[in-house]
Amino acid sequence: MSAPCIEVLATGPAATIQDLGRPGLAELGVGESGAADRPALRLANRLVGNPERHAAVEITFGGLAVRFGRAALVAVAGAPCPLRVRRAGTERAAGMYAPIYVHAGDEVHVGPAGLGMRSYLAVRGGIDVPPVLGSRATDTLAGLGPAPLEVGSLLPIGDRALDYPRVDVAPQPAYPDRPVLRVVPGPREHWFARGALAALYDSGGYEVTAESNRIGMRLSGPRLCRRDSRELPPEATVTGALQVPPAGQPILFLADHPVTGGYPVIAVVHPDDLPMAAQARPGRRVRFIPHRAQIMNRQPFNAEEPERQP
């Protein structure tokens, strides 16, 4: 491993190391984890000529500041934040979604996010912390991978990269103020009262609460009532599952969700909409709509749906 080359000066509300996670280990009780907004991580890596799965810093609401021990090529993608590069008493603005060259001793300061909530700082060569079970991702639920970043954390820069990028700037995706998420009925939709799915779709949306994190997005809105009050044995869950506790307020599972859950899942968010969900800030509202293919095919989400019990 190379010597530490990045010093963390400030973390903002939260900052972790993330890559594309640990897929395929759920049967061992290990969640996938990884970047909450994977397209943003992939883009940040491409902008510096990295393989898309290289580890980068996931920044929550901005506020990150780092100092480089050697010259490097960096890029920031995801929730838009103002960027400043400081060097020996001077300061210059820098743009997101573009490669940024920094010299030894330069500091990169990421300001507060104006829209969305998660941004990704990639450095050419990747963040070279030791992998755990094949990934450098921080799993905040299981405690796997590197610890969340703190002031004074030292991060090694790797030396594996692709050709230098041939791009000056990449298009910036839109982050809607009120995301609309497509869903399909979940494996326990039949545990809910008649009209529960319609209430999920037809309401004015659900507010993202301050209790949300990388594990799950806690929502507040119309109560989703159950018709089956039995205890549900723990069963496998997936990212995007809308699990509903007895109070009737859904929880949308995000990157660090548990591999099993004990509350029924009424619906599952389409994988293509999960990055947008991961950028929904507390206080904002999200809406759910039925996935068009579900309407056209009129088929259940799970073709091997468990036998319905009275």
Image (cartoon, grey):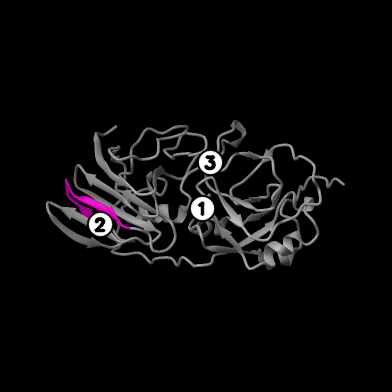
Instruction: Identify the residue at horizontal 56%, vertical 35% (top origin).
Output: 25
Q: Nearer the viewer, mark 2 or mark 1?
A: 1
Q: Amino acid at mark 1?
A: Ala
* Quarter the N terminus occupies: top left
What residue is shown with label 2?
100
For residue 101, the mark is none
Q: Amino acid at mark 3?
A: Glu
For residue 210, the mark is 1
Residue 108 placed where, x, y %?
25, 52
Residue 151 placed where, x, y %?
30, 40
- Using the rendered image of the protein, determine whether residue 145 is visible from the camera's viewpoint: yes
Quarter location, residue 3: top left
Report how many numbered discs are placed on residues in the image: 3
Horizontally, residue 302 falls left or right of residue 122, namely right
Horizontally, residue 129 falls left or right of residue 249, namely left
Q: CA distance from mark 3 to mark 1?
A: 24 Å
What residue is shown with label 3?
32
Q: Residues within 10 Å of mark 1 (few under 14, many from 20)?
A: few
Q: Earlier in the sequence, mark 3 or mark 2?
A: 3
Q: Which residues are magenta?
A: 100-111
Q: Amino acid at mark 2?
A: Ile
Is 137 included in the stretch rendered in magenta?
no
Q: CA distance from mark 3 to mark 2?
A: 30 Å
